[in-house]
Amino acid sequence: MAQRAVWLISHEPGTPLRGTVRFSRRYPTVEKRARVFNGASYVPIPEDGPFLKALLFELRLLDDDKDFVESRDSCSRINKTSVYGLLVGGEELWPVVAFLKNDMIYACVPLVEQTLSPRPPLISVSGVSQGFELLFGIQDFLYSGQKNDNELNTKLSQLPDLLLQACPFGTVLDTNLQNSLDNTNFASVTQPQKQPAWKPGTYKGKPQVSISITEKVKSMQYDKQGIADTWQVVGTVTCKCDLEGIMPNVTISLSLPTNGSPLQDILVHPCVTSLDSAILTSSSIDAMDDSAFSGPYKFPFTPPLESFNLCYYTSQVPVPPILGFYQMKEEEVQLRITVNLKLHESVKNNFEFCEAHIPFFNRGPITHLEYKTSFGQLEVFREKSLLIWIIGQKFPKSMEISLSGTITFGAKSHEKQPFDPICIGETAYLKLHFRILDYTLTGCYADQHSVQVFASGKPKISAYRKLISSDYYIWNSKAPAPVTYGSLLL
Amino acid sequence: MGPLSRDVWAQRLGAFRASPSAFMAGPEAEDLGRDLLGDLRNEKLSEQTKVSLLALSLEYPAQLWPDATAAEVAATSLLDTLVLLPPRPSALRRPLLLAATTALAVGGALGPTSGASCRLLPLLLGLAAGSDLGRGFVPASEQRPLQATACECLRELESCKPGLLGGSLGLLRGLLGQEGPVQPLSLLLSLALRNTLVLQSRAGAGLGALLTARVSPTAGGPWDWALVEEGDGRLQPQAPSWPAAEEGDGERSLTARGHSPEEVRELRAAVAQLLDTSYLLTPVAQAQLLWLLGWALRGLQGQPPALFKPQLVRLLGTAQLTLLHAVLALKAAFGEALFTAQDETLLLRRITLAAQHPALPPSTHLFYLHCLLSFPENCPLGPEGEEAAPLLLGPQLCRGLLPNLLHEPTALLARLHLLCLLCAEDEEEEEKGQLPSPGHYLEELLAGLWQRAALEGGPRALATLCFQASYLVARCLAGQPTVLTPLIHGLAQLYRARPMLAPHFVDLLDQVDPELREPLKVVLRQEVVSRPGRDEALCWHLQMLARVADGDAQSATLNFLRAAAAHCTSWDLQQGLLQVCRALLRAGVGGGLVDLLQVLARQLEDPDGRDHARLYYILLAHLAGPKLGVALGPSLATPALASSLVAENQGFVAALMVQEAPALIRLSMGSHEVKGPLPVLQLLPEALEPIYSLELRFRVEGQLYAPLGAVHVPCLCPGRSARPLLLPLQPRRPAPARLDVHALYTTSTGLTCHAHLPPLFVNFADLFLPFPQPPEGAGLVFFEELWDSCLPEGAESRVWCPLGPQGLEGLVSRHLEPFVVVAQPPTSYYVAIHLPPDSKLLLRLEAALADGVPVALRTDDWAVLPLVGDYLRGLAAAV
């Protein structure tokens, strides 16, 4: 269950080493156990320098892949998880849990309490999931609310002390590092009653509960025979409960209007104390039918101090909010494009913003453009080979808008135009970016009157909703496009 | 060394952390541990600096205090520092406890005879119990954090010495029931309980008594060193890997001994107590508790796992990786006893859902996908330990888990594996529902991957991904012609589009089973030989052909090679060509190859290439098939050199890699020849084994001569006298020198070797050259002119040259004969020597006495005077 060592490495492309170890922590008592458990297959934890080099090589971050290197490029070296074997000093260090996020590499080596040869399956190593959670926790701490490098550096400098709290001997006690930070501040509180380990203190002040529902809608639209368009809504319910008492009880209910789309694939925060079996079983894996559970979805819980994600869900709404087609044709030296977008009548026609980004990959800069739009304005980013069609706050009465034009490109330069392996030739997409406030596509809402709070004082309850686009692609219907298995289901 | 300032410490710690091994090899290493302990009590240092010192000792105790004695001293010192802290809040108490624990555990000092252990353990237990330790030892504000820390320290000690807390179970239970901190006590109790259950079943102590006994922490001590002994100091896996645990004897012994109803009741009560409060623990700690308790109770008679059931629904609803992982561990531990068929389906669906939930990060998806393919089924089919799709996971459930081209490489490969497993089942069942055929989808996906890999200028990662996918498909679906045929076709097309991927193809051929390898070889060979030999990608074609050429389609292969030979102008292309010839030789191709090799032996520009071609020709003409195989086969001594070291852009292949070898050649100096404008060394080579294509390279130390050319010998055989080798020297100064000698040669097994030979010494006399012979009778005038020309710039000297028994006449005829200009035997000789590059040395040897002759000498290069002196004085001794 324990970790032998933890690292944070910033990925710095273009520098001689391509990275720097920003933080590392070793656990010698765990290392001692590893030596005994692993026996002849024991490989010691390397020093930071060799580890950095081996990890960057394994993650293909050294940008020197001109030649075929067997230890990296062999077809039989297949990695299907974020757990790696690193070649260090002629021996293979395994398992190394590692992932890259925001130019920071998070890595740790969990203890395996047996011999490593043959390798046990990852599922049987308890330290792997513990390691992942620790790294996710560090990532959350570093990037929550962080705006610039200075803040990041401050947070990095706090890590040694925080890990001394959250993981003093290599066995993780808490992945919420903010709790550990607060723990030191709340140290003087002595509680006679049982205090949850995930709640370092108690709130004092005006009681209030805030619930915000954010739905993201993603879509792949092809406008093609034999390939189905797909779309999906992913919802996140975030809560902040400022309530007095050690363990106040709260129940929040999410409701749907009569024609709302049922919530599926619900995952809850560990502070939720019980779950209706209908919530547990409603899943997008099954074929939909009319008998699907449509709420209300009740979540009883004891809130932690901080803002947290009460639950996530997905939903299959009957139609995508914006249906479009995109046609692009190469005509000798120029491209001819036609775009048509239609907002569904059931969707609230009041955007915070709405834009269509039309990128052109593997081509040179835009040298010439002629276009016609029925609505909105077109911005041209010549060097980036990008068009942005700014649709604005509202679709016109007809709910339908169009854009057509011809574009000519200059010679391609490799530095400015990174290689895109998907958009080759006429394979192309446009991507929609929009946001609608006080609206959810499923219709899901948190009824303020149904929020039950068992704590002293009547809290002020506020609820927010918004819909955001995410990965909303409309592919050129005149060329092949990457399809998912789901698109073949007709 | 006195106390160090904050800055000095910061610098020192920084240097240590940058590379502990380098620091420990340096001069400051020895004092570091001692200074650190000393400065913890230095009142001038801030607490923050001291915390950073303690942090170092937490990470590197083995470097600071490498043996048990040092660790014991360190722990004692740390405890003293702790006791001496003034009774006010301090940031040092926690890290001091952690550091003392770490030092004892890592240094191997923990034991009943260790004084520090006997101080630390009661202190920890006292703190954990929240006892009043007197004298304001713990300020009130620090009591709870220290209580938790003490529990953590005890847990770590119990992990390193299982059974240590066997006697404290009752005490810990009591504390948990009171107001003690829930999480640290729960984790400590569950670990101690688990270890006791494993060890005590061997020791035979009464569990019930242990669970209820309340030992006062201040009395004699509840340390169960006996139970620790019982475990032979063997570490107990806290969460054993499940397949391995099945066979573990430690686990078996758990079931060996039944428990009394009393004991069973107490145990149930203890476990229920732990599970009931588990909600108060952080998710990671809850998961640890479940792993510990699950594996503690597994296989224990009379302990139905139903205790865990109330927790499961809550856990299944979360998205926490650790919690779902712990549920899977319970599933593996108890199987049907805890999860009915319906429960199993629900769990499987939750994992399937989590493996694709858009709200979770990609690395979590991948781990859940792995869990799906290693899912501990109630009724598993097929071999254990191999990844397989669980029976309940049909194509319908997997819809959302299939790969597409937009996925990251790791996700794509993981999902592709699942798709392959579905295809394998699909083949077996032939049960077509409404879903599109996985096989068809797989084909389209692979086509997309090949297309991407074929893109000109695409990154290597795309090519690697494509070959990994092809390999995965070939491995999972080896027996299915409907998959293999399009696979082969697609790969051939990829090669046609981008021959520079040849190294990937060679690697793929090395890795896959013959079912794919043989047909793929045929197709790729056709791809290569059907091209004209003058392709830009010729080096890739040759590399490919060296792997795929065999006895089939000989004439097409030879035609291609003949056409290619004309375009193999560079060394690496020629080597590539010869590699193919070699492959053909090994495959037993005769006929046309003989002609080709003969042509190559004449035509190739590079002598090395010609030699190899000639060698192959000789081998082919003279050796029967089996012997040829042995001669060309990789040497047994160097099997590891095959393929892995092949560097693509150089075209080296195993046998042509240059290998360091002991010298199989001896070189000696032959007689000194004096003719021509330059001094020439005669070298006599002698081989200990037959060697071919010998190249001798010489390097002059000190740059006294111009760089020397290499000397080539086609073939050397032991026992056969070789012609002397001539090595012309171009001195820049007339001075003796040492020559470094390297040999590069091919052995009879075809390996190219490099050897360092003993150095050769060029003597001063080896540089002597005669002046052109003056006309008959003009000798004296010629000599006098030379003699006079030496001064005034040059130097004049007299040297006594000892004479041996042979007298002056013998000495001159033996050593100076070619340089004599005027001779009046046996009394007077005038000698003129040209010293290249442009010096002269003139000697008058006259009026010899019985034991020596006075030599008058002049030279225009004063620097040679000492050399001449040594030379003349040594002449008598020289035979």
Image (cartoon, coloured by chain):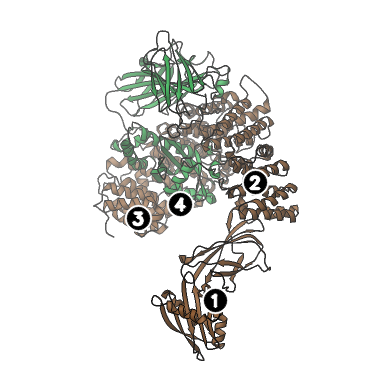
Mark 3 or 1: in front is 1
**In this picture, is A354 found above or below B627?**
above
Q: Earlier in the sequence, mark 2 or mark 3?
A: 3
For mark 3, give the secondary structure.
Answer: helix
Asked whether A390 or A106 is in front, the reply is A390
For disc 1, the marked residue is B773
For disc 2, the marked residue is B565
For the colour green, the matching chain is A
For disc 4, the marked residue is B225
Q: Quadrant of the N terminus of chain B?
A: bottom left
Q: Residue at x 27, y 45 (%)?
A: B90
Determine the CA span between mark 4 and mark 2: 80 Å
Asked whether B75 or B491 is in front, the reply is B491
Asked whether A93 or B815 is in front, the reply is B815
Mark 1 or 2: in front is 1
For mark 2, give the secondary structure.
Answer: helix
Whether residue A119 sits left or right of residue A139 in the image: it is: right
**Mark 3 — on which chain does it sit?**
B
Task: Determine which of the numbered discs, if any, sits on residue B76 in the image.
Answer: 3
For the colour brown, the matching chain is B
**Mark 1 — on which chain does it sit?**
B
Answer few, some or many: residues within 10 Å of disc 1's Cα (few below 14, many 20 plus, some between 14 and 19). few
Determine the CA span between mark 3 and mark 4: 20 Å
